[in-house]
Image (tube, coloured by chain):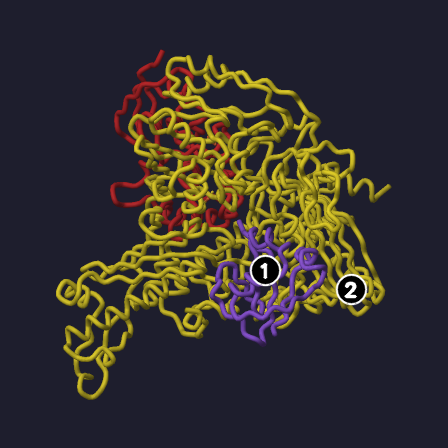
Chain colours: A purple, B yellow, C red
Amino acid sequence: MAEIKVWGGLRPAIGGAATLDIEASTIRELLRKLEEQYPDTAPFIEAGIAVSIDGVIYRDSWGQKLPSSAEIYLLPRIEGG
Amino acid sequence: MSNNTKFTGQSFKSVGTRPLRPDGLDKVTGRARYGADIQLPGQLTALILRSPHAHATIKSIDTSKAEKLKGVKAVLTSADLPDKNKGDQDLFDILDNCMARKKVLYDGHSVAAVAAIDAVTARAALKLIKVEYAILPHVTDVDEAVKPKAPLLNRKCITQGVEPTPKKASNVAKRTEFGHGNTETGFAEADFVKERNFKTEQTHQGYIEPHACVASYSPDGTAELWVCTQGHFVFRQQCAALLGMDVSKLRVTPTEIGGGFGGKTHVWAEPVALALSRKANRPVKLVMSREEVFRASGPTSATSIDIKIGITKDGTITAGDATLRYSNGPYVGPWAMLGAMTAFACYDLKNVRTVGYEVLVNRPKTTAYRAPSAPMAAFAVESVIDELAAEIGMDPVEVRIKNAAKEGSQSSYGPVYGPIGIGPTLEAAQKHPHMSAKLGKNQGRGMACGFWFNFGGQTCTDLNIAPDGTVTLTVGTIDVGGARASLSLIAAEELGISYEDVKAVVGDTTSVGYNDMTDGSRGTFSSSMATIIAARNAISILKERAATMWEIPVDKVIWEEGHAKATGKKHGNLAPLSLAEIAAEAPNTGGPIAGHNELVADGAGVSFATHICDVEVDRETGRTKVVRYTVIQDAGKAVHPTYVEGQYQGGAAQGIGWALNEEYIYGDDGRLQNPGFLDYRIPVCSDLPMIDTQILEIPNPNHPYGVRGVGETSIVPPLAAVANAVSNAAGVRMTHVPMSAPRILKAIDSAQD
Amino acid sequence: MAQLVSTKINNDPIQFVCEPQEPLLDALRDRVGLTGVKEGCGTGDCGACSIILDGTLVCSCLVLGVEAEGRAIETVEGMADGATLHPLQTKFLEHAALQCGICTPGFLIAAKALLKNNPAPTEEEIRYALAGNLCRCTGYDKIVRAVQDAAKVMRKG
Ligand code: FES
Ligand code: FES
């Protein structure tokens, strides 16, 4: 089971924890289960959540695989200039 | 897809050279067409009426007199642009910003628009529109706006991200938090702890080309828009949504763009031009004046930042804490959040916490400006690190090297870093001759680091091989500063042909698939990835065609140096076929040859920079001049080094302007006092020295050539580098940017008292 | 009442009609079609609209169209000799002295005016001569180098 770390802003929506246990093999599955298990995360998911896999930030790739040994970190989706 | 976009460490023929850019000739001869240069038959001139009040309820708008004026073809208010966004808050905000609904929220907020046969008539018509306002109390200062008694911009604004949810509305729209470890323990371990408040004023991207577009709406429900934009696909989405059109019925053609830096990433007046065209049934041209650009487009946040950092005697940072309040204008954005994510990103910290507050104020809607929100946070953090270094008697570069993040460090915004370049830029700075050069009288030296994420995103590219073997590359990302040259180099590299045989163009929204905008330094990063894959796809077709021409199996054909070569004992003696030779036979071997790619180019590498700055301060007047400046930055791989240097230099110059001069000045009446280049002074040629650059290349493992984004990071360190230099020259810590002459003088005087 | 104005633009006799209050910048762009002359501010602060009027560098946004009567105008469109670029144009390209390019026509004209009066300017002279032209993209470094290099080429003739 992958341990998923989340940024501070999302913690209130998952009951205050800094990490989550969600069994997921892709980004799509992770986000779907996140919303199922923690409905309060819905507005964050709608605003956009990026997934960092071993430090590489994925903003749009649902199909991206989540290796079981990887560090997974959820971040808000960000934009630049 | 992800497997074949990894960095391979190949050597290059074209990439890394410095050819002339394909669009250069048109730009030095005056032929290039920018937003305001488009002219359609029967075109009308549009102008916008803007609020003179910072905050007011619109009681009524009477357009009847304007409508009757001869030559006026359409008058428009928010009633003509109803909300069709089905609850999408971001789109609603953009709509409300384009044309105010019940309230005006800042000086310059648009309330009505006209389209007339010429500018003189349009101006006369604006004067005939009567708007009745009920003036409300306003607040423009970020620290004032968070006070409990501050006038409220939005009575429904309940702070998000706070537990339990507040019951009362405030101007704080959102709270975000990042970090790890325990800062209290960290501070307890420190030998020295420094706490300070820093302020930065609001600046504008200051692109020289004002927003401009020509809209032509046809009675059959289709429309065309020519516009200077950083993202024509995004403009198409936004305009179509705001006007209730089918996306595919709107064709957006990007003109050349005269600078954007984030300011042309969403629509300002384009939906208004389209709606006027729809109403008047004529093409409409809308060009903002410089004053409108300042009052109603763009700016970055004004900020107030509290920093607390603890350090041990031997120079280890034990904890960092930041509270960042960023002005957002009247609509909530991600601005303090980005400051909170980037503030400590250069360092490997055990204990770090950053908290951002998005603050609503009666100023124009905050928009991205080059590495948005990072320069202010870096200013605050890098200033305190310098002070602490002095306190423990350590060299400022040394302290930073000691604490620099490296591969495997947990970043202050969360994830663990891959291979990164902060350490190498610092070491390069340490060795740089600038660092040891002698300083003159009243001069001071400062240095600082900066970080930016860089993004990839949706990208779509077409590569077509012409019958004579030359190549057209059609991309959908806007070229803001030489991307067509870089992408041509990459296509040439991959195909093994010469740069001159590739012509890159930016396609309109009907000629390629969707592309995200050119922001987050993504243009070259992601379009190069798509170009490489498109070229590889074309090569596999070229090999098939060669096999057909030779009548041999395709697995016996390889591609090398722009030629198909047959391999193996049986075929090895066949003379190689050039791309041009294969292209010439295309009609007989299966028709046109093309490569195509669409992808999400994720995995853009983070980027770091270290800047060194020398200033001279006139202690009598406070006037400060930058006398030497050096930029050291990691580019991953510099595809066209001259344009990489240009990005470094341009970002540094913008940062220097921000550090010393540029600021929005509001009067007590909430009106902008300096909406023009005379009083909002960006650096001119005589203000600056040459800007030295040093490009480091630490390959991005997630790009075939190792490319990282290069466009944004260069604006991050200058505020701090200049502030550290001024503080060293003047002998007093500067905490308020811009460090205009009066502010410096005041600081010197109060230090002497 | 609109007036007829007779001028010489880039060595061609050109007539245009314009309103008495109309800036020369608008007349050149909208009536003559010389959109190489750019507008960045309309108030004389950015230099994007620079032209040479009877041998003098001016901001065309600060001159009225009617004031051009009987006078000679040089714009960026007239700098090249057919297909042969002016040395300043060549050097701006070689040095990548432009990114977005919106400021380029103004800089080229201002630099041309400078080199006519001072064929061997110092770096400081170049910086002050071009201080009326704003560029937001380049930080001026490559612009100054391009002008220095062009001056060298032009001195050699
Ligand atoms: S447009 Fe004339 S100086 Fe700016
Ligand atoms: S190149 Fe963009 S303003 Fe100069």
Q: Name the secondary structure under disc 2.
A: loop
Q: Is residue B589 above or below residue B285?
A: below
Q: Nearer the viewer, residue C11 or C97?
A: C97
Does the numbered disc 2 mark a residue whose Cβ is under 8 Å from ligand 2?
Answer: no
Identity of the residue furthest to the bottom in this view: B569
Q: Is residue B335 above or below residue B284?
A: below
Residue B644 x %, y %:
47, 57
Residue B610 x %, y %:
61, 60
In the visual, does B544 lie left or right of B327?
Answer: left
In the visual, does B132 lie left or right of B325?
Answer: left
Residue that label 2 marks: B182
Does the numbered disc 1 mark a residue whose Cβ is under 8 Å from ligand 2?
Answer: no
Specify whether disc 2 shares its chain with disc 1. no
Question: In the rendered structure, which amino acid carries the disc numbered 2?
Answer: Asn
Q: Name the secondary structure under disc 1.
A: helix
Residue that label 1 marks: A36
Please say whether residue C111 is visible from this viewpoint.
Answer: no
Identity of the residue furthest to the top in this view: C1
Badge 2: few (under 14), some or many (20 or more) residues near its Cα, within 10 Å? Answer: some
Badge 1: few (under 14), some or many (20 or more) residues near its Cα, within 10 Å? Answer: few
Name the chain under label 1.
A
